[in-house]
Amino acid sequence: MATIRHSSRDWVMRAPPSSRMERIEAYFSGRGYDFHRHDTYAIGRTLAGVQSFHYRGALRHSLPGGSMVLHPDELHDGQAGDRDGFHYRMIYVQPALLQQALGGRALPYIDTGLSQDPRLFRTIDALLRGMDRHLDNLEEDDALYDLAQAMSAVAGARRGRRSFDFAGAERARELILASLERTVTLDELAAASGNDRWSLSRDFRALYGTSPYRYLTMRRLELVRKLAAGGIELASAAATAGFSDQSHMTRHFVRAYGLPPGAWLRMLRARTR
């Protein structure tokens, strides 16, 4: 994968931490990040400039006034659509959180990743305000519920809907969360779910937007980012999170976020200087 060269003007700011989601604000003068995919929804809006990205076989352009909703595990990149760069805010929400409001329905899917629907704009706004403060727990829960309902309404019904064993998939997900530092097998997850391994695999993808292995890998990467942002060396963070070594972690990091962990840390520090 090609190395991305960032301008000294580029920066990323993270909102105060939350156990439910990650909120960021960022500016990129040109190329932001290479092709990557993550297992969260990426939901937000462009504040200034033209935010261009390849998504589902086409080049999309996000402008101020609209909303972006990128589905989990969909490959995408990001770059400025003009020479003024682009400024944006984004929320990264785990599908498991939205499932608490959706009640086991299939995840909402907005084909183009872009929407002009005012219902979606309003619900996203509730989560993007106050980037410099913690959201109250109840405020955050209410906003996430409203967001899930708006996304479902805007996306509409999907063809081929079937019933899912949400309780079984949730038991498997909880086992993954308790197993970050050790090897876990699909047979072990299937036993916890009470289903056969292939039924669990299908249900897990429909309910959480990604495979069990990808879900485990992304939770490990989240731990790496938390440790590294707190000053832990990347090699130590990788070992603590269950990766075999730093290079193993870096390969997964680039695939998930579109830039190496060192570049991510430099942009975080650029905003705090």
Image (cartoon, grey):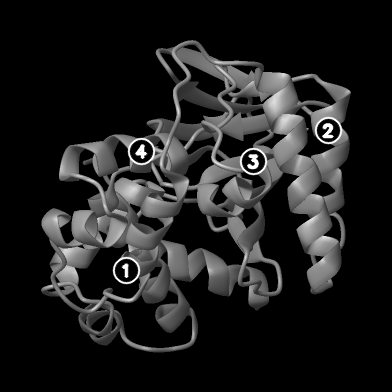
Q: Position of residue 73 (x, y in %)?
A: 39, 37
Asked whether residue 152 appears in the rendered view, the answer is: yes
* Three-letter residue code for mark 1: Leu
Crowdedness near tag 2: few (<14), some (14–19) or many (≥20) residues, C-alpha within 10 Å: some
Crowdedness near tag 3: few (<14), some (14–19) or many (≥20) residues, C-alpha within 10 Å: some
**Real-space CA distance between mark 1 and mark 4, rounded to the nearest whole angstrom:** 16 Å
Q: Position of residue 32 (x, y in %)?
A: 49, 42
Dot label at residue 203: 4
Asked whether residue 135 appears in the rendered view, the answer is: no
**Real-space CA distance between mark 2 and mark 4, rounded to the nearest whole angstrom:** 30 Å
Please say if the residues under marks 1 and 4 sit with CB atoms less than 8 Å apart: no
Dot label at residue 175: 1
Q: Is residue 127 left or right of residue 225?
A: right
**Real-space CA distance between mark 4 and mark 3, rounded to the nearest whole angstrom:** 15 Å
Closer to the camera in the image, 90 or 96: 96
Which badge, 3 or 2, is on the more N-terminal residue?
3
Give me the residue at 22% from left, 81% from top: 235
* Three-letter residue code for mark 2: Phe
For disc 3, the marked residue is: 102
Dot label at residue 121: 2
Which badge, 1 or 4, is on the more N-terminal residue?
1
* Three-letter residue code for mark 3: Leu
Q: Which element is circle 3 on?
A: helix
* Three-letter residue code for mark 4: Asp
Q: Is residue 104 left or right of residue 170?
A: right
Q: Which element is circle 4 on?
A: helix
Which badge, 1 or 3, is on the more N-terminal residue?
3
Give me the residue at 36% from left, 46% from top: 4
